[in-house]
Amino acid sequence: MKLVADTDILSIFSRIDRLDILNELFEAIIVSPSVKVELAEGKIDLKKLGPEFAQLTTGELKDLKYAHSELDKGEKECYVIAKNRNIPLASNEKIVHRLCREDNMSYFSLPRILRLAIKDV
């Protein structure tokens, strides 16, 4: 399965040099344009991950206008991509988890990803 991942999730795995965990668990990691910029600004290298860099569709760009105001730009893009493409979303933000539950979307928190990795061993 593919996964849309926000900045926090990707930076955590990058900082501990374990992007391989995400590669082992998911067939592809999708990174939104704003998340790509945020990671570059934080000097976080995703070469080991080999992510798919998403381009927002016209419909997704329209949906951004209606995304929850408490989400930052990267979180909004990730949420809209995940929702429109029916792909699980990885985030540590409780508001993202709540919105995913409300919209019946699949999501992963850091603890859930780690539990999957432990079971996969």
Image (cartoon, grey):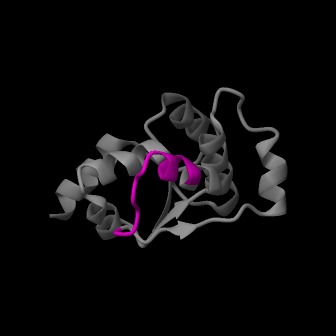
Residue 13: image location, x then y, percent: 31, 51
The magenta region covers 37-48
Residue 48: image location, x then y, percent: 34, 69
Quadrant in the picture for residue 104: top right
Q: Nearer the viewer, residue 119 or 63?
A: 63
**Position of 5 compared to 113: left or right?**
right
Give the answer, above or below, for where 103 lies relative to 62: above
Q: Residue at x 39, y 59 (%)?
A: 45
**Position of 82 compared to 106: left or right?**
right
Q: Residue at x 82, y 40 (%)?
A: 65
Residue 40: image location, x then y, percent: 50, 53
Q: Residue at x 52, y 55 (%)?
A: 88
- Which part of the image, by quadrant, shows the N terminus? bottom left
Residue 81 in sight here: yes
- Which part of the image, by quadrant, shows the C terminus? bottom left
Whether residue 79 is in magenta: the answer is: no
Q: Nearer the viewer, residue 80 or 10?
A: 10
Residue at the farthest top position: 70
Quadrant in the picture for residue 47: bottom left
Residue 72: image location, x then y, percent: 63, 35
Give the answer, above or below, for where 92 lies relative to 89: above
Q: Residue at x 71, y 32 (%)?
A: 68
Give the answer, above or below, for where 104 lies relative to 93: below
Residue at the farthest left position: 121
Residue 6 in sight here: no
